[in-house]
Image (cartoon, rainbow, N blue to C red):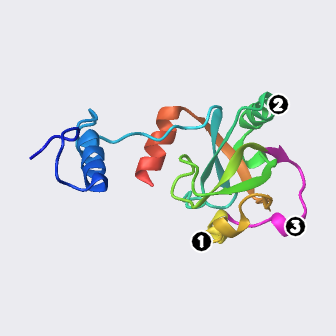
Amino acid sequence: MAACGSNSLWAPHIRLLLCAILAGACSGDQPGTVVEPELPEGTYFLLGMHGDTLGVEDFVAVTDDTAVTATVVEQLELAPDLRWLHIHGKLGSTNGGFNLDWDWHFIPSAWKLVEMSIEVCDGRPSGLRNLASLLAGDSLFCPWSSYVKKELSLEEVRRLVEGS
């Protein structure tokens, strides 16, 4: 077989394709190597829904906004049944690499915790399944029953995403 750069009889596009395949085969990545997705910078939080004792509606949000982080930390100092600020923000499609097995995520740093929101954006996380691509971008989601459960380390986020 002629090498990629030699004068072979193969059509130029076939040679180019073979060179690309061979270059990929020698790229240094081992077969079966899992490349972890890059997680957005910021602080990660696990949120749940009041009344959901099994955690089936849990979701993850991330922010690098220090004011939002400070508000979340204040909420975490309260007992769970006293954490009545809920998340309010814009949605992105896909899980963003961090939002468990949901097909949506809060756009990092495009959300905050609030006391009140208009009812039209209220709902349950499961109500968005299969709709996130339609809602992504300018759509707001503000589940009134949501509350912050805990801050998550990057390792905890990775474990939760793998386990979902």
Q: Is residue 151 left or right of residue 119?
A: left
Above-or-below relation of 14 to 132 = above
The tag earlier along the polypeptide, 3 or 2, is 2
Residue 6 percent location from the top left of the image: 18, 39
Residue that badge 2 annotates: 67
Q: Residue furthest left?
A: 1
Using the numbered discs, state the Cα–Cα distance from disc 3 to disc 2 in whole angstroms. Answer: 25 Å
Amino acid type indicated by mark 1: Asn
- Residue 86: x and y in percent read 79, 51
Vertical placement of 36 versus 91: above or below?
above
Q: Residue at x 47, y 34 (%)?
A: 155
Q: On the rendered structure, is 77 left or right of 25? A: right
Residue bearing the label numbered 1: 130
What is the crowding at mark 3: few (fewer than 14 residues within 10 Å), some, or many (at least 20)? few
Looking at marks 3 and 1 on the same chain, the residue that comes earlier in the sequence is marked by 3
Residue 139 placement: quadrant: bottom right
Is 46 a magenta residue? no
**Which residue corresponds to mark 3?**
119
User: At which x and y percent is residue 134?
Assistant: 69, 69
> Residue 163: percent from the left, percent from the top?
41, 51
Q: Which residues are magenta?
A: 111-124
Pick the residue in front: 52 or 15: 15
Labels 1 & 2 near each other (Cβ < 8 A): no
Relative placement, left or right, of 10 versus 137 is: left
- Say what secondary structure mark 2 lies in: helix
- Does 116 lie within the magenta span? yes
Q: For marks 3 and 1, give the one nearer the viewer.
A: 1
- In which quadrant is the C terminus drawn? bottom left
In the image, what residue type sits under mark 2? Answer: Ala
Q: Between residue 20 and residue 85, name the one nearer to us.
A: 20
* Amino acid type for the residue under numbered disc 3: Glu
